[in-house]
Image (cartoon, rainbow, N blue to C red):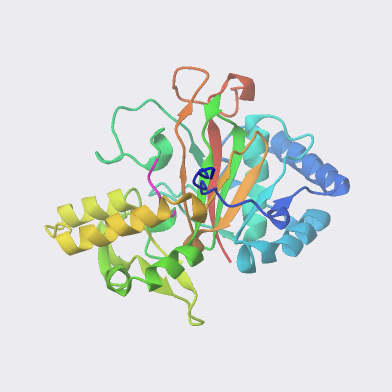
Amino acid sequence: MSTALAPTQPRTLEVPAEALHAFSPQTQRELAAHVAELGRLHPTGRVDAIEVDLGALPLFTAEIEASRGVIDSTTHFIVYDRVEGVDSLRAQGLYAWVLGTALGRPMVQNTDGWRLIEVYDRGIRKTIEEGARYHQTKQGSYMHNDAVNDVDPIDYLLLSCGQSAHIGGESILVDAKPVHEVLVRHPDVLAILTQDFWFEKRGMALSGETGFFRSPIIRYTPEGEPLVRYFRTYIEVAHEKKGEPITAEQRDALDFFDAVLDQSSVQYRIRLERGQTLVSADDRFLHTRTAFYDRFEPREIDMTVDEADEANRYMFRMWSAK
């Protein structure tokens, strides 16, 4: 008598060991002391206004340079473990600012010139479809890159965890390379995705500047490596505002693309815990977050006075360019 085999269930990709980095004890002590000194010198005010002296952090900068190749050339992402002695929300923000500065030049993320953004649910009633930016809400399931609202792509996306969600809130990462391998087998879809689409400079357009630009979803490095720029909602809204709605052919291609991105076989899942920091090569990876449930009702959080234990899911985001 034969026994029917259960169908094999696809699994998400396993995070390779090289993508997990714990700083040495000596580096952690150096970092914690430097962050404490920055906190003493700058107890209030915007963290991203602080000048960082990387020369004071030789052990830290050496470890960053030693691990940079993982982001640039191999897995294209890395998770730095928590630093002992960096405990408060503001201290985590200061550490994130130092880390993002060590990676490269911090990039502006809004018209106010902010280069460090707090990502948490503020309880606003406006949705992404209605014009809210992703970092202000708890909406999930939007696979995207971060700097899709800026003409100039960024090299590194940094997401540092000041407090994790009570339940859920995983980061889902999708490498563009295996996705592209699927698209190559469907040249009609790939041909559409390499054409220009409208993008909106949501939250980034300066006064007197056009709020839209055109870019392909899939483009290539001079060496032929695939790069990606994608946030479907931003694209569709941009096309509507420009009076050029997405065509049926484009919609079919986007539906196909979304279906590929949604396959567990091309996804990594990482739940950042308090103190951990994820850095990815932004134009080589797409990401989103799973649904999450917070400890408290959403509210405005002030990292200079609020304790981490009193906060909901709370992340710091930076964009850095080499």
Using residue 23 as the reference point, say whether residue 289 is left or right of it. Answer: left
**Residue that lies at the very extreme toward the left in this rendered image:** 243
Residue 207, position as x, y percentages in the image:
28, 54
Figure label count = 0
Residue 240, position as x, y percentages in the image:
16, 53
When asked about the image quadrant of residue 37, the answer is: top right
Q: Nearer the viewer, residue 219 or 39?
A: 219
Is residue 144 inside the magenta stretch? yes
| Above or below: residue 13 compared with residue 74 | above
The quadrant of the rendering that contains the C terminus is: bottom right
Q: Nearer the viewer, residue 34 or 65?
A: 65
Using residue 298 as the reference point, say whether residue 236 is left or right of it. Answer: left
Q: Main secondary structure of the magenta part?
A: loop
When asked about the image quadrant of residue 229, the answer is: bottom left
Q: Residue at x 40, y 36 (%)?
A: 136
| Above or below: residue 273 compared with residue 207 | above
Using residue 192 as the reference point, say whether residue 155 is left or right of it. Answer: right
The quadrant of the rendering that contains the N terminus is: top right
**Residue that lies at the very extreme toward the front in this rendered image:** 1
Residue 42, position as x, y percentages in the image:
66, 37
Residue 155, position as x, y percentages in the image:
53, 63
Q: Nearer the viewer, residue 265 or 40?
A: 265
Q: Residue at x 76, y 36 (%)?
A: 36
> For the magenta stretch, what is the residue range?
141-145
Residue 199 at least partly seen: no
